[in-house]
Amino acid sequence: MSGSLAERLNSARDRAFVGRSAELRRFRAALRREPGAGAVLYVHGPGGVGKSALLRRFADEAREAARTVVEVDGRLIDPSPLGFEFEAARTGGAGPGDDVVLLVDAFERCQGLEGWLRDRYLPHLPERAVVVIAGRLPPSTAWTVDLAWSEALEVLPLAPLDPAASAALLERRGVATALRAPVLSFAGGHPLALTLAASVAVSEAGPRVTWEPTPDVISDLLAALVGDLPSPTHRMALETAAHTMTTTEGLLKAVIGEADAGPMFTWLRGLPFAQYGRHGLFLHDLVREVLDRDLRWRDPQGYEQMHRRAGHHLLARVRTSSGSEVMSAVRALTYLKRYGPMAPYFQDLDQEGDVYEDTLRPEDHDTLVRMAEEVEGERSARIVGHWLAHRPSAFLVYRRTDTRETVAFMTWLRLTGRGEEADADPVVSAAWDHVERNAPLRPGEHLLLCRFMVDPETYGGISHVGHLMQLRICVDWIRSQGLGWSFILSPDATLWSPLMSHLGHRPVFDTPWDRERTFTMFACDWRVTPLEIWFDRTQPGALSETPVTPAADGPAGETLTRTDFDRAVRDALRALHHPDDLRANPLLSCRTVAVEAEYGNTDPVDSLRRLLTETVAALLDEPRGAKAHRAVVTTFLERPRTQEASAQRLGLPYSTYRRHLAHGVERVCELLWRRERSEASSG
């Protein structure tokens, strides 16, 4: 009876086992003692990648070859030489003359025995013995530098399953065809993830065409991939590394604090699923995915806080980096966009390198004009020629890496004043009309206008080339001194409006064009949207796209007394960088905020921030308002630690600074109160 059950279990394992053909070939070669085959195979890879399943298959094949199989599980032994020898003797009785195959699983649990095993235990095994050691960590360099082991040791890093093997596993597990793509998208080729996901997909079989990993799947994967963590600080460091593109010690300082950053970075570097490159360390994709999903589900507030701290650190990197490091820094910053409702614009843009950004060359002119005519028509071609003649430095060209062929271009205008060159282009002229009508540039300010983004292959759509253009635009938004306005022209407002709104750019006018096409211009006034506020508005947002209901003290539309209103304004200015505090501010019940949120389709907290920063900027339009504006901006937007520090930054005596600040806050309260009364009366 037991023999029959064992046969059934072995048969089930055979049916479920897929892939690993290269590893099986190496093991069979070792069994046959083929020339060049290693006597010791060292298999390593992250938890759940299939090491134990592979060792079970090795055991079955060894027994079929009439070999004596000795199995040692590092999780079950006393991690000492005596404990290892006792377990080996108990499971198989390896000894001189035996045709033994020794299989050691979970070796990371007794890694301290590595030197003893290499130098003392293994050399005394019989000549025909085959040894397989499987663990999460690769062998130490002591194996590889020892000439005696160079021929006997074969290291086999265990990678995820290839796409064909992954699909075969899901098929054998009975996963419906319609559900295989989302399961593969989540699990990749990770065997444990595929198996767990398959079990859920099969148990929930029905007319479903989509699939999401459940918390139970994520919890089981975390236990297998990561195991027990020493402390909450270790968990926070690991979650930060999972959330960001690459992790440095400096980034950890921003998230978990300076005291713990160094030790935690060293610990992260030693993890079996972490790799290290020039820009920092990064985790295995599945570990990254599972950790991030778990934190977001388990602790949304902690997730948002971690994201915000990491983002502000990366924002500072973009501001301060130089040379080629700037693009790496902004790429790491925009990587965070793959979380939350903006994910569709960024999730599938990892495979870069086939196209690169370059400067304009004289021989490019005819090519760019021809591209413009091909995708937008003759009128656009003439305007491209106009800007090539007047602003050649505004053109960025994108070339194929292998052939250097020009495949796309962007016209990124930096303008300080209106002139004939601008009025020759009806779109740019309309942008100037908008600026002059709403908020003219002040001395020392400029506007940035993305006039053309031409990629004939994916015109107007989401693409790798378009992503490179977006990176360049973000760099200039963040690093430009004196930026007043920015404009982006799009041929597909339906596709791009959600992202433009998320980035603080609103549609300001439409321009009918050739070929029955309509261009939409999106604009942002950066004087009322300081950089830190802009970044805070571009957080991942809620776990769903359901609008956030304001948690104000009273129902929407409730009227505050003037005293309560002024107090709420002062509290909101102090909480400008703390969205959780703003969410409880009574101003969220005011009609002005409700109208702003409805118009911009934004979270009321974002709308309140915008109202506050717009009103602070309006102080500049008042007689003698510049000093009050500087005091309010320095105190509440730039956030020195103390008011004394604000006075010092402004170069003013403390009493003078306090007088300007009080006047500025008073005027902000008055302006907002007037606006609220106006909205209430019109409503």
Image (cartoon, helix red, strand yellow):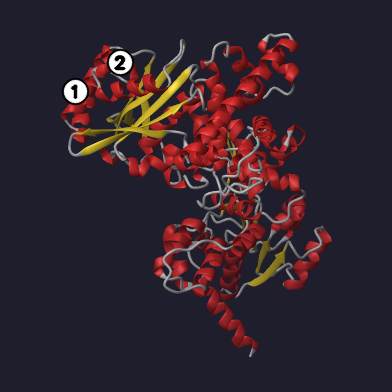
- In this rendering, would 440 be left or right of 325? left
Residue that sits furthest to the front in the current view: 681
Residue 119 appears at what percent x and percent y?
Answer: 74, 51
Does residue 200 appear to the left or right of 131 in the view shown? left
Pinpoint residue 52: horizontal percent, then vertical percent.
Answer: 62, 64
Q: Is residue 111 visible?
A: yes
Q: Quadrant of residue 389?
A: top left
Mark 1 belongs to which amino acid? Arg
Residues 585 and 368: in front is: 585
561 or 535, nearer to the observer: 561
Residue under the point 71% across and 42% down: 267
| Residue at mark 1 | 382
Disc 2 from disc 1: Cα separation: 14 Å
Q: Residues within 10 Å of mark 1 (few under 14, many from 20)?
A: some
Looking at the rendered structure, the secondary structure element under dot 2 is loop
Question: What secondary structure is marked by label 1?
Answer: helix
Instruction: Identify residue for label 2.
Output: 391
